[in-house]
Image: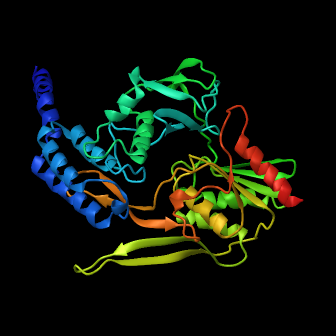
Amino acid sequence: MKNLFLILIIFLNIPYAKSQNNKIDKIKIRQDLIGIIQNIESQYTYLEDKKVNIECIKEKYIKKIDEIRDKSEVVLLFEYLLNEFYDSHISLNTNIRESYRLSSPIFVELENGKTIIKNVWQTQIENLNDNIVGAEVLKFNEVDFNKKIDDFPSLCNDKTLPKVRNWIANKVISGKYSEARILSLKLKSGKKIKFDLDGLNLKREKELITSKVENGIGIIRINNSLGNNQSISEFDKVLDTLFDTKGLVIDLRNTNNGGNTYVAKGIMGRFIDKELPYQKHSYIELFDNQPKIVRSWFELVSPRGKQYKKPVVLLVGRWTGSMGEGMTIGFDAMNRAQIVGTEMKRLAGSDFGFKFDNQNFGYSLILQKLYHIDGTLREKYIPPNYVSQSIIHKDEILEKGIELINKMIK
């Protein structure tokens, strides 16, 4: 009887415990909101490049605090605030079911008022049968796609600006974790189909680095592992078996999550025989209400281990992200590889982590701009050997890379 009484007390207190656990303090939310806006104004290096009304953000997001009912809506408040800057390299370090995903296995561009699929993540998709490259996206979950862009939950950015609208279009395609992603497509042939984006199977390689040899040419794939320090020794093992090849293809098209400079410089060091610059950093210093001063420097790569001296080609695409992009401009700057592919993920600058004073999650902002040593912003770099994706049934970028290797050998 006593045990039954205890169980009843516990059961009756569950709703109370849940409400206490989900309790929010709007004063603390306001403090954190003001804090993140101040950090954006003082440290976000791309603020002046963005067409953003910061006063609108202050006014409307402070008002939104009054509407918040639970902790999930606190997360969305800060997530949507960062989305105002249409920058895929700044984000919260947490998400909920109603959050938008950070990326999608397809990339779209707006052309003459239409949303066109320009790229698919061909190297990672296992079950794509229809050639959707070039298809027009008509609807998303049965809602007109342009309306989905217009209804995107940002309060202050100008959705008529092409850059903003294109960024939002890809955010809509990425979708929320909580919703299906059924696209109504009109293929280039004119045929209309329903396309379930969540029905795609993406490859999940277990190895950090994989390789093979085809017709005397070594092909190394980095499997989204530029953030794993063990990738350096794994790359060394693979490269050391390929010194008898005629040339080398390094595939960076699956580096969606980026990585770190430790791994990237470790890999690049195997291809040079002297210290060389691979990228330029730049940021603004401001102290004691004095004038803004630009601080910039070139970052160097040092040679490491036995050098591979034969021709090298790098393959890149829309899912070559952050440190993958840094490696790409580095190989190009050091004149150590031919770069083949499309635009990359275009994650601008170098991100740094921040903490809220009152929340159990944080966020990232871009404090430094990164450049090719020729002065080109990293996010604006375009491969000299550009390959416009047109079909899904053959790897056009790899074919171009192998063709280039053979020309370089001759």
Left or right: residue 205 versus residue 403 is left
Image quadrant occupied by the C terminus: bottom right
Residue 81, percent from left and from top: 27, 48
* Residue at 13% across, 34% down: 19
- Residue furthest toward the front? 112
Question: Quick check: can you spot residue 97?
Answer: no
**Residue 370, can we see it?**
yes
394 or 98: nearer the viewer: 394
Vertical placement of residue 296 versus 114, above or below: below
- Rendering coords of residue 350 (x, y %): 44, 62
Please state which of residues 209 and 347 is positioned toward the viewer in this rendering. 347
Quarter that holds the N terminus: top left
Residue at image position (12%, 22%) is: 8
Which colouring convention does the figure follow? Answer: rainbow
Residue 236 shown left or right of residue 310 in the figure: left
Q: In this view, does 384 lie above or below 114?
A: below
Would residue 349 be found to the left or right of residue 25 on screen?
A: right
Count of residue discs: 0
From the viewer's perspective, is 256 left or right of 215?
left
> Viewer-proximal residue, 21 or 321?
321
Percent x, y of residue 217: 82, 52
Determine the residue positioned at 60% across, 46% down. 254
Taking depth in this image into account, of 233 and 215 the one nearest to the observer is 215
Q: Which residue lies furthest to the right in this view?
A: 410
- Residue 335 picture quarter: bottom right
Q: Whole-percent x and y of residue 247?
A: 81, 58
Q: Quadrant of residue 40?
A: bottom left
